Image (tube, rainbow, N blue to C red):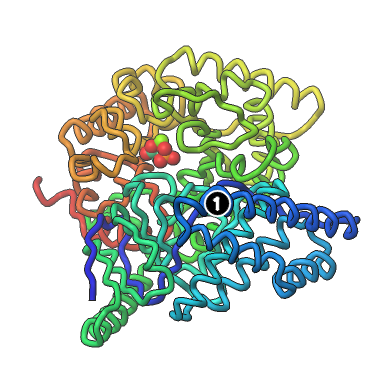
Amino acid sequence: MEIYKGTAAFPGIAIGKILLYQRSEYQIRRYLTGNVKKELEDFAAARIQVQKQLQALYQRNKKEQEAHAGIFLEQEKLLQSGSFQRAVESAISSEKVNAAYAVMTTKDEISNTFRNLEEPVIRRRIQNIREISDRLIEALGGISPRIDLGEKPVILVAESLAPTEMMEMGKEMLLAVVTHQGSTVSHSTIVAKTMGIPSLTDVEIHEEWDGQDAIMDGYTGTLYLHPDEELQKEYEMRQKSDIQEHEALLKLKDEQDCTKDGKKIGLYANTASMDDLNSVFFYGASGIGLLRSEFQYLGRENYPRESELFLAYKKIAETMGNRPVVIRTADLGADKQADYLDIPDETNPIMGNRGIRLCLDRKYMFKAQLRAIYRASAFGNLEMMYPMITSEEELDSIEELISEVKAGLKEKNIPFRNIRTGIMIETPAAVMISRELAKRVDFLSLGTNDLTQYTLAMDRQNPLLQKKYNDHHPAVLRMVQMVVEAGHQENCKVCICGELAADTALTETFLRMGVDSLSVVPACILPVRKAIRETNLKDFD
Ligand code: PEP
Ligand code: MG
């Protein structure tokens, strides 16, 4: 048995096989073709191209590395073998898909079928298939990422994961996620948490782990490889007691979010898409306190149109009914990138053109979102807030755009509501001017993830800083207190929507500070509800 220590990012226990995810250099998109013949011809041309590459590689390497160069001959033979070729051709013809996608699915099918076989000959053959497929796909020029987790739930292990990659995975097939890069508050971890998947970061990854048995303990931050029988049994028991604990928590599903002394606290959910709405209802959240709307802009090839955004917001508004839904306007940039956004390389993207700055630079994109939100406001209880605010001037610009949007809607007789607006307080600058900001909106929402990174001047994603990254730092907590006081002086409600809101060790502290509401990933609603209900604010009176 081998034991690896990392940083626990989301609690839970997973027992299963590891699937090692290695990102390809390219991205592949699936599309249906009306011209199967052309795709077959493209595939044939790609095969010839790759065959030439492999021969050249063999020639180039054979003198110095005869032993290793043989691999290229082996791959060439495989490329010419009828079975792989026929499998791809049959995928193209029967599913009428593009050649690059057919190559990828064939590769995945073969790898998954033989994933658990240990024989070195088979493992080598699979590796060869992966490599020639990669070359073929490159020759065919595919785009857009996709991860296939196979048929059985797995512990996904990866060097790093982009938020979009996390989102592409079906959570039914994910027992847990283990990464080397990333942190407890990186966006891919937040996506995993939103999906309720136990997560572990800061673990050095080894390729040989693929297909091996493992246990992931998301409480202690430990990964056990080849667990012995005794440990396996112990963890099976712990999984059972986890389930019992969860069942006990489920009894709180329909309970009020009130402290023992009767103070009502708003408890909301953080979501990234429509897929999360079921769990919002399931855990009995009072609404959505943070809808990370930027995820609708990721993993695609062009800006979403206003009509697409409108339909999505309308559906959320209708589904949530009277419950409030706070749409955070697109917080793109930094680690939330898409090629079409064409954001120039920045030396320090975290401090770069992101969030509201990017939106105010791209008014066409921003107005489309504002219009979509206002149009959808007629169908439910929508609210809106802005990320990464640092100045009142930014608010001036936003208000100007909102006036234009409203005027345009009125002119066309399109119904909308005057929705409540809020500001995310996630920069020290916003904290310092929170009283002025509070005068201009209905609520403030503390984004403690960014607020911590900007206050401590520590990149929230940097694994080297994990142990130094102290989100309980007195500077952060004092800022929360300052914002609550500033907000209340201006009759403005104050919420916390960063990950700290789910930290039950701080629930009582926040409630004593006067925080009005907390917004957390759906899976954390019940533990936080329990902590709220166990707090008695009169205790020290
Ligand atoms: C935050 O910064 O705390 C926040 C809620 O926004 P995000 O994590 O999406 O940056
Ligand atoms: Mg933020």
Question: What percent of the width, then of the height, locates residue 517?
Answer: 36, 44
Three-letter residue code for mark 1: Ser
208 or 324, which lies in front? Answer: 208
Horizontal placement of 134 versus 440: left or right? Answer: right
The quarter of the picture where the C terminus appears is top left
Q: Quadrant of ligand 2?
A: top left
Query: Residue at horizontal 26%, vertical 39%?
Result: 514
Query: Residue at horizontal 62%, vertical 19%?
Result: 401
Identity of the residue furthest to the front in this view: 63
Circle 1 is placed at which residue position? 24
* Quadrant of residue 86 within the rendered picture: bottom right
37 or 277, which lies in front? Answer: 37
Horizontal placement of 98 versus 103: left or right? Answer: right
- Using the image, determine if residue 474 lies above or below residue 277: above
Query: Residue at horizontal 32%, vertical 54%?
Result: 201
State the SS at label 1.
loop
Question: What percent of the width, then of the height, locates residue 153?
Answer: 48, 74
- Using the image, determine if residue 72 lies above or below residue 289: below
